[in-house]
Image (cartoon, helix red, strand yellow):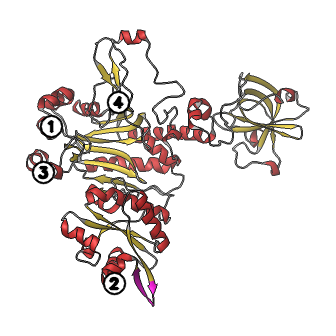
Amino acid sequence: MHPYRSHTCAALRKSDVGQTVRLSGWVHRVRDHGGVLFIDLRDHYGITQVVADPDSPAFKLAETVRGEWVIRIDGLVKARSEETTNKAMATGEIELYAQEIEVLSAAKELPLPVFGEPDYPEDVRLKYRFLDLRRDTLHKNIVKRTQIVSAMRSGMGAAGFAEFTTPILTASSPEGARDFLVPSRIHEGKFFALPQAPQQYKQLLMVAGFDRYFQIAPCFRDEDPRADRLPGEFYQLDVEMSFVTQEEIWETMEPMMTSVFEQFAEGKPVTKQWPRIPYDVAIRKYGSDKPDLRNPIEMQAVTDHFRDSGFKVFAGMIASNPKVEIWAIPAKTGGSRAFCDRMNAWAQGQGQPGLGYIFWKEEDGKIAGSGPLAKNIGEERTEAIRQQLGLEAGDAAFFVAGDPAKFYKFAGEARTRAGEELNLVDRDRFEMCWIVDFPFYEWSEEEKKIDFAHNPFSMPQGGLEALESQDPLSLKAYQYDAVCNGFEIASGSIRNQSPELMVKAFEKVGLSQADVEERFGGLYRAFQYGAPPHGGCAFGIDRVVMLLVGAKNLREISIFPMNQQAQDLLMNAPSPATPTQLRELALRVVPQPKKD
């Protein structure tokens, strides 16, 4: 017999009754039932119940074992009685009667519990991540992550893609965050950068003629922690294709990702035909470029209903500024003063002056609007708003006024709040869409100049002629995001493969041709020697896994994550370099003055 196991802890079934077998694993828990010991033995695959009664030669040693000890057990497989069968366990029809136990490794008192998975401080969980990973939910999440990645690889292979590995030590690239720099020992005073994404390399692969590339790519960004991204590093399904339109990229990736979601959705519906929503439409309807389409609320402009109306606040704003619009947030079933007051109080808590509202109720056989706004604008305008929004008695509408460029995010948050408060969001489904036609440039208030709104390597719609003749802030790009349940899960574009167009695009943000050649020399040179039209995208693996397992935190689907302060508590990183290491790299640490 094998020195440690003949079966795993998930393998035994009723057909194995009568066999003498050997199992090894961790002691999940020990229960004493009137002198008979029950040990739940756990390994990577599952749990088997082991029984040691006083007549067993293994009983004396069984009395000493504790949780998370690693033990080997030889025993006889027996069938459980019908009343003691555990249908929740794969091995629930049998139990193992212990004949011999060997302690392979004892465990000290645990710094955090494994059995039962109670809430525990995150710093302890991360410091002892090897114990945390034994917890059933986290263990299953990590296993499912590997299965999801495997399904992605299979899907990409079936679609004719080949996986290529790009360098980790590379040059700095403008991907929207700070680089992690790696000092070069051989080239004193010079630095490599860890890739924020394999963007330039995958484009170079297209220039090199490889046609369909993908990679499960590690990406590194030295940015402040965010709720939807782990600090330091993340993984993406990176994709690039040659001789394609953006529609062909959507048509290729959409069914593949739909299939991945369906495999792991546990029966929840998944969007089969992803709608394509222009960026401007998404902002006006949902107040966000990553809308949660499970929320049925769609905002509408109702400016004309308030123009020259008796509600002087809105009417005055409209008259004094042509940019002013009034947006309505319809709220089905929200037609009570109590709910409207709660929404108004929430808006004030967000730093807003308030949230105007109308709610409708049935009076004397007809639907009438209530609230201060309804009284001010009158019955006819109130009814026109109700008709436009398709509302009935028992419904409400909230109103936001001003320049949409300044208030759309708050309006989107109000839409989300109303949908959640009223239980309008169908949480048991995966709603996908593509957000398309992103702006090519945006105004940077911080730097007081225009900057790229998305990927700087994208193709502007209209090409060189549009770049030379149009207002830069009016330009659209062949750029798109994939969104699921309010999370951006992918981003991509058709690339700009023209050297002349590339220089012109960067000149608009203040970079010269010399700057382009210095910063992106490899790509710029490659485009001089026959570059095919190409494009691609990258799906965030961490976010996809988080959605599919229903986790609220990215650390619940990552094997060895950092904490929110970008520290690895398990390995104690980052840590100071030794004087010898610094000397070899010709570096000196200069302490920064502490800020008050």
Q: Nearer the viewer, residue 336 or 19?
A: 336
Instruction: Tell me if label 3 and label 1 are in contact, CB under 8 Å.
Output: no
Q: Disc 3 residue type?
A: Asp
Q: Earlier in the sequence, mark 4 or mark 2?
A: 4
Residue wearing tag 2: 379
Earlier-in-chain disc, 2 versus 1:
2
11 or 149, nearer to the observer = 149
Which residue reaches farthest right? 55
Q: Is residue 366 magenta?
A: yes
**CA gap, disc 1 and disc 4:** 34 Å
Q: Residue 262 at x, y = what percent?
A: 48, 51
List x then y, in percent, for residue 265: 51, 51
Q: CA distance from mark 3 to mark 1?
A: 16 Å
Residue tagged by mark 1?
Answer: 510
Q: Which mark is residue 164?
A: 4
Q: Looking at the image, which residue is at 74% across and 45% down?
A: 92
Say whether disc 3 or disc 2 marks the residue closer to the N-terminus: 2
Within 10 Å of disc 1 (Cα), the crowding (few <14, some 14-19, many 20+) is few
Of the two numbered discs 3 and 1 on the same chain, state the one appearing first in sequence.
Answer: 3
Disc 1 marks a residue whose amino acid type is Gly
Q: Give the answer, above or below, for where 285 lies relative to 554.
A: below
Q: Which mark is residue 471?
A: 3
Of badges 4 and 2, the one in the foreground is 2
Which amino acid type corresponds to the residue marked 4 in the rendered image? Phe
Secondary structure of the residue carrying numbered label 3: loop
